[in-house]
Image (cartoon, helix red, strand yellow):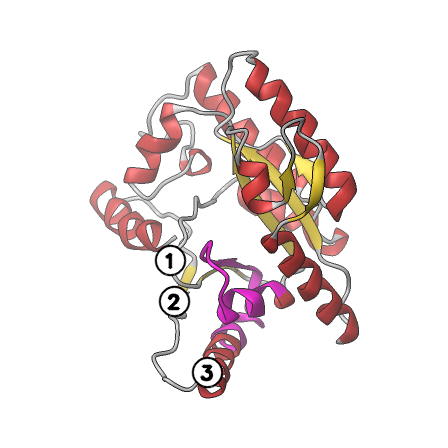
């Protein structure tokens, strides 16, 4: 998100085009030596960053690091929707969701799954609505490989055991990487107006992104606006401390 927030305005200025820009804020880890004081500092800065945008955005997107930190757990308690991308590697489900035996049987939830469960319990105690946990398969290969089928089997078993639902996610496409370098996404490309011509491959990739937004099944009062706005802007995230992007003009 940080790379997109820095690069996209430069591209828009150079190309003289009007691109929707998210509001971006970084909440780094506290440098205070005392643990209690550091957690209080991180909570204050995280909630302060949310308060600045919560009345003026459609959705706040929090990009958390992969490590287990207080700041990451705090962000999980605020989440209405938790999106976990998973690459096409058979060892990945064990690292995020559960430990498996040699026969791909689920032994018990992993540290991350247990952490999510605890944050769900905390959110329930605080009176919040249940977190919708979505696991998306990312960078899918176009080949019908055995590893791909095995991944599907393991993920479905994990979903029943741990309590998340799955989304197809995005395929491995060069166009995503090319646009990311310019801080853009396929939803920023439009026909006409001097923009690049869209091939069938571009259209298929753009539909993947739209399908993913629809699969998130966002709250009914906001889902239509979210999908509509996603046709004009979207972002690919990379973990870095705890970062926040906000889609303008409504509420979280």
Question: Residue 35 got which mark?
Answer: 3
Q: Secondary structure at mark 2?
A: strand
Q: Which quadrant: the C terminus?
A: bottom right
Q: Secondary structure at mark 3?
A: helix
User: Whole-percent x and y of residue 122?
Assistant: 72, 71
Question: Residue 26 got which mark?
Answer: 2
Check residue 127 for magenta coloring.
Answer: no
Question: Residue 176 got which mark?
Answer: none
- What is the CA distance from the residue labelled 1 to the residue labelled 3? 21 Å
Q: Is residue 252 visible?
A: no
Q: Secondary structure at mark 1?
A: loop
User: Whole-percent x and y of residue 157?
Assistant: 74, 34
Labelled pair 2, 1 in contact (Cβ < 8 Å): yes
Nearer the camera: disc 1 or disc 3? 3
Question: Residue 240 got which mark?
Answer: 1
Quarter of the view holding residue 118: bottom right
In this picture, residue 34 sits left or right of residue 165: left
Check residue 53 for magenta coloring.
Answer: yes
Image: magenta residue range = 49-76
In this picture, residue 88 sits left or right of residue 126: left
Q: Residue at x 62, y 67 (%)?
A: 78
């Amino acid at each position: 998100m940080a790379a997109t927030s820095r690069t996209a305005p430069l591209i828009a200025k150079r190309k003289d085009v009007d691109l929707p820009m998210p509001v971006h804020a970084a909440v780094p880890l506290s440098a205070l030596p005392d643990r209690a004081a550091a957690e209080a500092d991180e909570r204050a800065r995280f909630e302060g960053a949310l308060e600045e945008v919560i009345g003026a955005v459609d959705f706040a997107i929090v990009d958390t690091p992969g490590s287990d930190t207080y700041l990451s757990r705090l962000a999980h308690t605020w989440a209405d929707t938790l999106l976990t991308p998973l690459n096409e590697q058979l060892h990945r489900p064990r690292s995020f969701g559960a430990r498996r035996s040699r026969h791909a049987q689920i032994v018990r939830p992993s540290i991350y799954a247990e952490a999510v469960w605890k944050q769900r319990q905390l959110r329930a105690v605080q009176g919040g609505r249940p977190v919708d946990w979505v696991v998306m398969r990312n960078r899918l290969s176009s080949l019908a490989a055995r590893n791909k089928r095995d991944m599907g089997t393991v993920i479905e078993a994990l979903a029943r055991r741990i309590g998340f639902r799955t989304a197809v996610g995005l395929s491995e496409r060069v166009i995503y990487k090319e646009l990311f370098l310019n801080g853009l996404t396929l939803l920023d490309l439009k026909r006409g107006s001097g923009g690049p011509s869209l091939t069938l491959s571009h259209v298929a990739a753009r539909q993947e992104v739209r399908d993913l937004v629809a699969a998130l099944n966002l709250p009914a009062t906001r889902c239509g606006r979210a999908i509509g706005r996603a046709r004009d802007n979207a972002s690919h995230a990379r973990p870095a401390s705890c970062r926040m992007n906000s889609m303008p003009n409504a509420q979280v």
